[in-house]
Amino acid sequence: MATQRMAWIGLGHMGTPMALNLIKAGYELSVYNRTDEKLKPLIDAGAKPYRSVPEICQDSDLLFVMLSDDTAVSVVFDQLLSIDIRGKLFINMSTISPDLSIKLSDMVLDKKGKYLEAPVSGSVKPAQDGTLIILAGGKDEDYDIAIPYFEKLGKLSLLLGEVGQGTKAKLAINYYMSVVVEGLAETVLFAEKNGIDRETMMFITNESACGSPMSKMKTPSILQENYPAAFPLKHMMKDIGLAQGQGLNTDTSKAISTVYKKAMDMNLGDEDLMAVIKALK
Ligand code: NAP
């Protein structure tokens, strides 16, 4: 499959390091992003830039899509589907609603194209390190085509069933993350209120059975009270909403949703999800 003409659409926090990893692995890549400035690191690494979705689609056989949400993915797929897509494989790595993913798959198949969903677990650092977890849904034969690329992007990929199943698994693991981060924020604030400083509390947490890669990764930002986006809070808000749309209806999920919504109302959407601590303070 090395002769396939490959494209990457969407060069945000995740798309940029993921696309760069494919280039580092030796693949030739065409790239598109709505905002031109984000093309630069990819052009510097040797990618061929496009400024039109139909044109990059026309010139490619295998297209990765990594966009923010249902709206962005719908807008871009409208343009992708405006041309003849026979035989082209679309690997959609964005986190979107399972219903939209199934609808897109049907539309692509109607036009004799191929569709695999492959949302990822892991944020910017795993994207840079090529250690994401890729949760695919779709046909075996399309997954088989994707495997060599997934091996460059992640440490693990799983085909979980038909289109929709990968996205549902992604929403479940992200919900767990939303609870863990919110719980960590509450813990730190509770301790602080009772005279235990943040540094001490994070040391205790990280040494305890509750210490995790997540608590360790968030420790510097909690101590510095600075939350540059690795996983933007607005995307977690989106994913909680998607999970609720998929039937998540527990008391905890309702409370969590209220807290993240408050953080959004405080304009923290572009900060890391750990900034939810500011909404709790
Ligand atoms: P991001 O940095 O916000 O980038 C979003 C991308 O979507 C950009 O390329 C943006 O283009 C594009 N976009 C947004 N609206 C668009 C529209 N209407 N038309 C065309 N393009 C549009 O997002 P990200 O952090 O890379 O996340 C990408 C996806 O991965 C999301 O679904 C997110 O939930 C998921 N995810 C993220 C993380 C993480 O840690 N960040 C982890 C796992 C999964 P512009 O540059 O022009 O704005």
Image: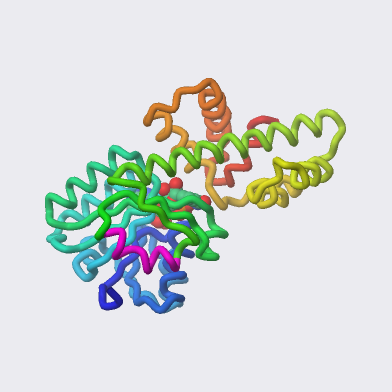
Q: In screen coordinates, is 243 left or right of 55?
A: right
Q: Percent position (x, y) of residue 34?
A: 35, 58
Q: Percent position (x, y) of residue 209?
A: 72, 42
Does the segment drawn in magenta span residue 1?
A: no
Image quadrant of residue 191? Answer: top right
On screen, residue 247 above or below 107? above
- The residue at the point 42 percent across, 33 percent down is 243
- The residue at the point 53 percent across, 20 percent down is 251
Res 37 visible: no
On screen, residue 105 above or below 146? above
Q: In screen coordinates, is 236 left or right of 191?
A: left
- The residue at the point 54 percent across, 57 percent down is 124
Colouring rule applied to residues: rainbow
Question: In this orientation, which residue lies closer to the viewer: 234 or 175?
Answer: 175
Res 132 visible: yes
For the record, the magenta segment spans 142-152
Q: Percent position (x, y) of residue 181?
A: 62, 39
- The residue at the point 31 percent across, 67 percent down is 7
Image quadrant of residue 274? Answer: top right
Does the segment drawn in magenta span residue 144?
A: yes
Q: In screen coordinates, is 139 left or right of 22?
A: left
**Marker count (numbered):** 0
On screen, residue 262 above or below 199? above
Magenta stretch: dominant SS? helix
- In the rendered image, the quadrant that contains the N terminus is bottom left
- In the rendered image, the quadrant that contains the C terminus is top right
The residue sitting at the right extreme is 195
Q: Percent position (x, y) of residue 258?
A: 54, 26
